[in-house]
Image: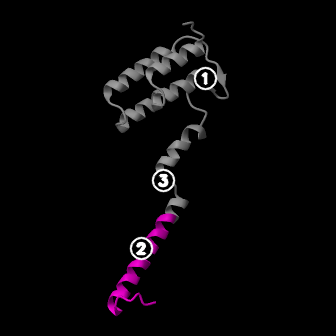
């Protein structure tokens, strides 16, 4: 199929288009067969509801190890988790308590310290 660029340039452009189509096809195949890491990370919290009692602290350690949070933030969050873990009987929802769910959300960085303390107080039935 001549492109009107001359015999030599037509062959080069056609070859480049074929290479681009092949690379695009390989990329699309890999993306569909093996999804990227962020999609798997987003699915992980709902995929594994049964966790140990120390999972919030473990998530926090992992975030610190990956460099998502600095040392000061890690120590502050760890102290908050430990302070809120004592006292009150947990209200169980399925295999996780409501308090453990909130602790995990805090460890993942989904809620800030104020929200964490407020929700934990509400779950324990503290009056304001």
Check whether the beta carbons of the residues at disc 1 and disc 2 lie within 8 A of each other: no
Q: Is residue 12 above or below residue 98?
A: below
Q: Is residue 51 above or below residue 43?
A: above
Determine which residue is flagged by label 2.
20
Determine which residue is flagged by label 3.
36
> Which is nearer the N-term, disc 1 or disc 3?
3
Label disc, if present, on residue 125 of the rendered structure? none
Label disc, if present, on residue 98 of the rendered structure? 1
Residue 45 falls in image quadrant: top right
Give the CA separation, mark 1 to mark 3. 31 Å
Q: Nearer the viewer, residue 78 or 105?
A: 105
Which secondary structure, mark 2?
Answer: helix
Give the mark toward the camera: 1 or 2. 2
Residue drawn where x is 49% and y is 21% of the image: 115
Region of the chain picked out in magenta, as a range: 1-28
The percent position of residue 66, horizontal first and vertical second, equals 37, 38
Give the CA separation, mark 3 to mark 2. 21 Å
> Which is nearer the N-term, disc 1 or disc 2?
2
The percent position of residue 93, horizontal first and vertical second, equals 66, 25
Which secondary structure, mark 1?
Answer: helix
Reply yes or no: does residue 61 show up in magenta: no
Q: Main secondary structure of the magenta part?
A: helix
Reply yes or no: does residue 14 show up in magenta: yes
Residue drawn where x is 46% and y is 14% of the image: 83
The percent position of residue 88, horizontal first and vertical second, equals 58, 11
Give the mark toward the camera: 3 or 2. 2
């Amino acid at each position: 199929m001549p492109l009107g660029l001359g015999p030599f340039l037509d062959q080069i452009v056609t070859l480049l288009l074929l290479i681009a189509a092949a690379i695009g096809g390989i990329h699309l195949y890999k993306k569909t067969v093996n999804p990227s890491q962020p999609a798997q990370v987003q699915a992980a919290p709902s995929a594994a509801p049964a966790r140990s009692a120390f999972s919030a602290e473990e998530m926090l350690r992992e975030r610190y190890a990956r460099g998502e949070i600095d040392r000061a933030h890690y120590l502050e969050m760890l102290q908050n988790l430990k302070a809120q873990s004592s006292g009150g009987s947990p209200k169980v929802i399925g295999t996780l308590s409501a308090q453990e769910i909130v602790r995990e959300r805090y460890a993942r960085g989904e809620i800030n310290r104020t929200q964490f303390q407020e929700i934990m107080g509400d779950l324990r039935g503290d009056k304001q």
